[in-house]
Image (cartoon, grey):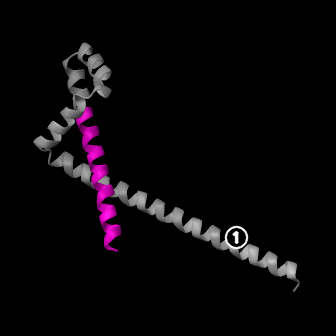
Amino acid sequence: MTLYADIDQLRDYRYAREKAEMDERADAETERDELIASIAKEKFASKVNRLTYDDIVGGMHSAMQSKHGEALRTAWLMGDAQFGAMVKSIVLDTMLEDAETEAICDVKNLERTH
């Protein structure tokens, strides 16, 4: 082998190794995201099945934030059923956000213990 062939082989090896490491990191991140999504889905289903006052109040607090103001106003003008459906939707969205946050915390705790 010549010096150039050795350099090419070394460069190819280094490139392959870096690519493999990047692929492993991407796979690990995908697996982590899937785990978080799975845990969040279970937590959300549990929250819906055992609806608590805290969930409702938390969702209502979220509904009172200005980011929902226009949608609530529109639903109010459309009638009671639409307004109720909008509030329920906001409560459910808040519960889903809470479930996702809890899932992320659970995965972080798992990562710390391993």
Which residue occupies the foreground of this view, 76 or 107? Answer: 107
- Which corner quadrant of the image does residue 83 belong to? top left
Q: Residue at x 86, y 82 (%)?
A: 3
Q: Decide: is 111 above or below 49.
A: below
Q: Which residues are magenta?
A: 89-114
Lateral position of residue 11 relative to residue 102, left or right = right
For the view shown, which residue lies furthest in the bottom direction? 1
**Residue ID for mark 1:** 15
Which residue occupies the foreground of this view, 97 or 111? Answer: 111
Question: Where, quadrant-wise, is the C terminus in this rendering?
Answer: bottom left
Residue 100 belongs to the span the image colors magenta: yes
Which residue occupies the foreground of this view, 93 or 78? Answer: 93
**Secondary structure of residue under mark 1:** helix
Q: Residue at x 58, y 65 (%)?
A: 22
How crowded is the residue under tag 1: few (<14 C-alpha within 10 Å), some, or many (20+)? few
The x and y percentages for residue 78 are 26, 15
For the view shown, which residue lies furthest in the top direction? 77
Residue 108 belongs to the span the image colors magenta: yes
Q: Residue at x 36, y 57 (%)?
A: 36
Majority secondary structure in the magenta region:
helix
For the view shown, which residue lies furthest in the left direction? 53
Question: Where, quadrant-wise, is the N terminus in this rendering?
Answer: bottom right
Lateral position of residue 107 relative to residue 29, left or right = left
The x and y percentages for residue 64 are 22, 28
Q: Decide: is 112 above or below 96.
A: below
